[in-house]
Amino acid sequence: MTVPFTYHAKAQSTFKPPLIANENAFLGDIETSEKENPDKPMSAGFYRLEKGTPLVYTYTYDEMKIVLEGKFEISDETGNKVTATPGDVLYFPKGATITFTTDDYGLAFYVGTPKG
């Protein structure tokens, strides 16, 4: 069986993720393997946070992010805290509670296993 790949031209600048929380947190899958692999799908998309209310999120799956633009202040319940800037890669294991803030905005690309 031949399976094609999927291409999203200029996705970083053209895909606008929907609002998911507060007045300033946007996230949306641009692609998922749910149809092809329903037992162990991967999802990928963009997360944008604008100045305003911090987003506190507890992961129910493993996820990785790479910061593309702007800056995030990221902390967890263990006391870890970083300022993440373009090119930085972060891993959030299932069960981690993470607080995201920014003094302007941040944009990240993520890949996760939502049924992990």
Image (cartoon, grey):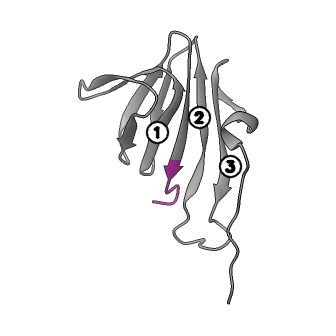
Q: Which mark lies nearer to you, 1 or 2?
A: 1
* In the rendered image, the vertical position of residue 61 relative to residue 109, given as above or below: below
User: What residue is pinned by disc 3?
Assistant: 30
| Mark number, residue 47 | 2
Residue 28 lies within the magenta run: no
User: 90 and 116: which one is in front?
Assistant: 90
Residue at (56% x, 11% y) in the render: 104
User: 75 and 60: which one is in front?
Assistant: 75
Left or right of 110 on screen, residue 81: left
Residue at (46% x, 23% y) in the render: 100
Left or right of 31 on screen, residue 109: left
* Contact (Cβ within 8 Å) of mark 1 with mark 2: no
Quadrant holding the N terminus: bottom right
User: What residue is pinned by disc 1?
Assistant: 66
Residue at (68% x, 49% y) in the render: 30
Left or right of 79 on screen, residue 86: right
Of labels 1 and 2, earlier in sequence is 2
Which structural element holds mark 3? strand
Left or right of 40 on screen, residue 85: left
How much space separates mark 2 and mark 3, taking CA atoms?
Answer: 11 Å
Quadrant holding the C terminus: bottom left
Q: Whole-percent x and y of residue 58?
A: 44, 37
User: 6 and 110: which one is in front?
Assistant: 6
Q: Whole-percent x and y of residue 33?
A: 62, 65
Dividing the picture into quarters, in which one does residue 11 lie? top right
* In the rendered image, the vertical position of residue 66 relative to residue 7, given as above or below: above
Identified by mark 1, the residue type is: Ile
Identified by mark 3, the residue type is: Ile
Identified by mark 2, the residue type is: Tyr
What residue range appears in magenta?
111-116
Q: Residues within 10 Å of mark 1 (few under 14, many from 20)?
A: many
How much space separates mark 1 and mark 2, taking CA atoms?
Answer: 10 Å
